[in-house]
Amino acid sequence: MTNSQHVYRIIFLLAGTYNLAFAIWLVAAPASLFGLINISIPFSENYILPLAIGIALYVPIYIFAILHPEKAKKGIGFCLLSKIGTLFLACILILAAGWPVALLKMVFFNDVIWWIPFFLFLRKNNTGI
């Protein structure tokens, strides 16, 4: 195992752990989670469980990337694209639906912070899809 594979395994472990913890917190105490950015839950509570499940579904991708970094390009590419898409969706919801701008703080810590390490992983492993 190369040093960079070890670093990326740590990154994917952190990403998976973060996603799982975020999903659990979202289900267990959504008001306290959104309270961190000083907003009330900006959508119906009926959407909390499906959102948490969607967030937790990334965890198997990260586990696969930890175990098989040489085969993880497609999965990490999917994760990166979805995290970029989340920022665009949040901007649309803020501009068009009046959601609180503070939501961007949550998007930053849940999505944007992973852009650089995921991009670097994909760039380093650019051997074709």
Image (spheres, grey):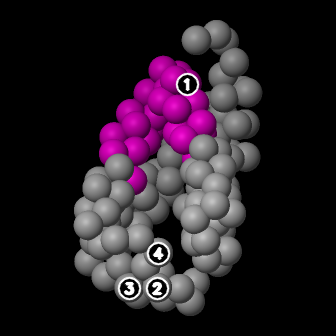
Residue 110: where, in percent of width, then height?
Answer: 55, 61
What is the secondary structure assignment of the residue under circle 3?
A: helix
Q: Secondary structure at mark 4?
A: loop
N-term mark: 1 or 4: 4
Does the stretch in magenta take in 57? yes
**Residue 56 in sight here:** no
Where residue 92 appears, x then y in whole percent? 64, 55
Q: Is residue 7 above or below residue 47?
A: above
Viewer-proximal residue among 90 and 121:
90
Magenta span dominant secondary structure:
helix
Sequence-first tag of 4 and 3: 3
In the rendered image, which quarter is residue 94 located in? bottom right
Residue at 28 percent of width and 56 percent of height: 50
Q: CA distance from mark 3 to mark 2?
A: 7 Å
Tag 1: Cα neighbours inside 10 Å, few (<14), some, or many (≥20)? many
Q: Earlier in the sequence, mark 2 or mark 1?
A: 2
Helix, strand or loop status at disc 1: helix
- Judging by the rendered image, the residue that carries numbered circle 2 is 40
Say whether residue 13 is left or right of residue 21: right
- Give the Cα distance between marks 2 and 1: 37 Å
| Tags 3 and 1 touching, CB below 8 Å | no
**Looking at the image, which residue is at 66% across and 29% down?**
122
Q: Which residue is mark 3?
A: 31
Which residue occupies 60% across, 37% down?
81
- Give, as a single range, the part of the protein colored magenta: 55-83
State the residue position of label 4.
Answer: 42
The CA span between labels 1 and 4 is 34 Å
The crowd level at tag 3 (other Cα within 10 Å; few <14, some 14-19, many 20+) is some
N-terminal-most mark, 3 or 1 = 3
Quadrant, the N terminus:
top right
Q: Are marks 2 and 4 in contact (CB under 8 Å)?
A: yes
Disc with the residue nearer the chain's start (3 vs 2): 3
